[in-house]
Image (cartoon, grey):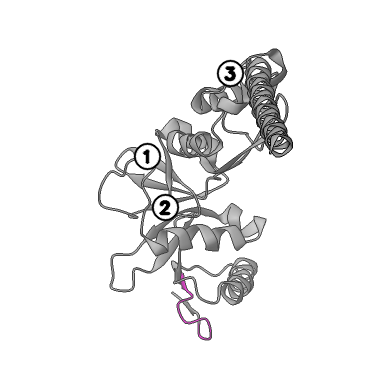
Amino acid sequence: MVSNSSSYKKIITKRKRRSVKRKFFFALWILLFSAFFIFLIWGFNYFYNSNYFKISSIKVTGNEKYQEQEILDSAELVYGLNIFDADKKKIEDSLLEKMIWLKSASMKKIFPDKIEITVIERKPFVKAVYGADYYIIDDEGIVLEKINVKDSENYDNIITVKNAFKYRPEEGEKIAKKNLLSCGLIYSKLDLELKGEIREAYINENFAEDIVFLTLNDKKIIFGTSDRIEDKNVILRVVMEKLKSQKISYSEIDLRNADNPLIR
């Protein structure tokens, strides 16, 4: 009985020792894990606030209309800002919202401290007239800028269109006028010599809203719509060369029916 009682006490003692060891090692593991976790947080916070992640280089590409600093100001990007604080979507959306001439904007982070911004700017396509003002419009119908007669000379490479709208549009507004953009499309496909003959265009107030081009000597070229542009351009070239070579007087060339052009 004594022997059994002694053995039982030894077993109990061993179990207690193992339990204490387990508790000790578990507490030690918790302590080490906590220390490691705290170290990670400290390390991340140290690097986060160090110069390692502060923006030291910002590269802007694709800009012509806007200066680089204008883009950085609109993006609210400054040197020394932590790269993690540069919100890609917010910056891209802000650029497109504030800068009418931008068609797209993309920001790329190059860790640890570089930013690249790539923009695509809208291009002037037509200049539409309303009253004494000119409105520069791109190929999507976006009103880019309102300018005066003097400044319009800076855009002599695009066609001037009259009677395009009956109100003063706002910058950034999209003009839903198909024939306005068709004027620019037709003009862009003319060869240089024909472009040199054209002074301006206007949209007729008839039901079809025909596109009409005026030459430098006030002759009318009634183009109609933008269908069969290539065919009409070829016909126009042949007709004008024939009229010029034969010194035939005319007031208008009607290309609405490309298969049967009329000269009046």
Residue bounds of the magenta highlight: 253-260
Q: Is residue 130 left or right of residue 180?
A: left
Of 58 and 197, the residue lying toward us: 58
Specify the amino acid type for callout 2. Answer: Val
Between disc 2 and disc 3, whose residue precedes? 3
* CB within 8 Å, label 1 to label 3: no
**CA–CA distance between discs 1 and 3?**
28 Å
Magenta highlight on residue 256: yes
User: Measured from the top left, where is residue 190 in percent x and y?
Assistant: 61, 62
**Distance of label 1 from label 2 (alpha carbons):** 17 Å
Is mark 1 in CB contact (under 8 Å) with mark 2? no
- Between label 2 and label 3, give the one nearer the viewer: 3
Is 213 drawn above or below residue 160 in the view shown?
A: below
Q: Residue at left 66%, top 55%?
A: 192
Q: Secondary structure at mark 1?
A: loop
Check disc 3 and report the residue beneath it: 78
The residue under label 3 is which amino acid type?
Val
Residue picked out by circle 2: 161
Q: Residue furthest left?
A: 167
Q: What percent of the width, then of the height, locates residue 241?
A: 64, 68
Q: Earlier in the sequence, mark 1 or mark 3?
A: 3
Image quadrant where one finds the N terminus: top right
Nearer mark to the viewer, of 1 and 2: 1
Query: Toward the viewer: 214 or 205?
Result: 205
| Marker disc for residue 171 | 1
Q: Quadrant of residue 244?
A: bottom right
Residue 4 visible in the displayed image: yes
